[in-house]
Amino acid sequence: MNKVSWFYNWAPTPDEELVNCFEKLGIEYIPMQWGGGGIADLNQTIYGHSKHLFTFNETNFHAQSNVLPAQAAQMWPTLEAIAAQRGMLIGSPSAAACGPLPTDCYAGSWDPTPWFTDFFGNCTNCKVDFLNTHIYTCDINQFTTFLNNLKKFNKPIWLTEFACPAAKQTVAVEIAFMKAALQYLENEPAIQRYAWFGTRLDPTDGWLGPQVDLLDDSKCALTDLGTLYNT
């Protein structure tokens, strides 16, 4: 039985060839305003059947959307108005576990807490329905500590990307990490939604590697990891 209920692709609209499939399956596509550009066009390009809106991908990464907290707060009224007009819940910018070097990240911090603290400090009257974040680690203690620290912001948490990285990890290591992570995620009341990354990765990927794949292209079926995730 398919238990996938939502997905996104870092854009306001889904891939056109997927629309018929996910609508038939009752799967929600969640649009995203990836960075600070193009907000004026968002209301015209956003997918019309969505119930949620994602905002600003990995803001605390200099190599990702790289939106400062004060900038995000300044743009927030526009995003909030679009979400309100469409009856959508709106997620925080997805500040995330950053790296690999401190200089790659806002405030020189691997932890996104400084970014979130400054964002909410600049956006005191902003409507934010849930906290959006990512983490890639193979250390379950680091994983749970990271998410537990984000409870201080008193928002439901959406973990919209996570996996055990490094292409040299074995499938057994991936399965062990996923089992521990799912046990935590399913039993932690602060976690509202979560999503493993990814479904199909190129075998030449040098960071995550195909052992994180949930789908097996050669068999047109779930991998062992995918079967565990969908249980």
Image (cartoon, rainbow, N blue to C red):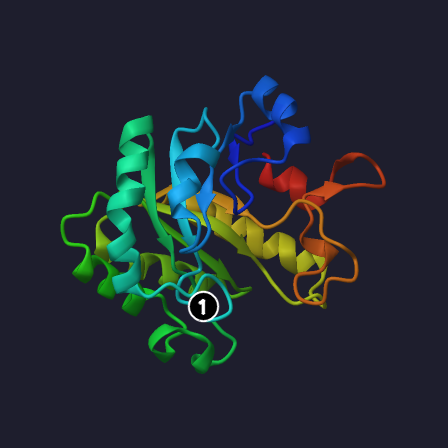
Q: Is residue 133 visible?
A: yes
- Frontmost residue, 130 versus 85: 85
Measured from the top left, where is residue 5 in percent x and y?
Answer: 51, 30
Question: Which residue in the rendered view is the most extreme toward the top?
Answer: 24
Label 1, residues with CA under 10 Å away: few <14, some 14-19, many ≥20: many
Q: Is residue 11 shown left or right of residue 75?
A: right
Measured from the top left, where is residue 6 in percent x and y?
Answer: 51, 33
Measured from the top left, where is residue 199 in percent x and y?
Answer: 66, 44
Q: Quadrant of the C terminus?
A: top right
- Frontmost residue, 182 versus 92: 92
Q: Is residue 197 shown left or right of residue 37?
A: right
Q: Amino acid at mark 1?
A: Phe
Residue 103, placed above or below residue 110: below
Residue that badge 1 annotates:
61
Secondary-structure class at tag 1: loop
Residue 135, placed above or below residue 1: below
Question: Which residue in the rendered view is the most extreme toward the left?
Answer: 125
Residue at (25, 63) in percent of width and height: 70
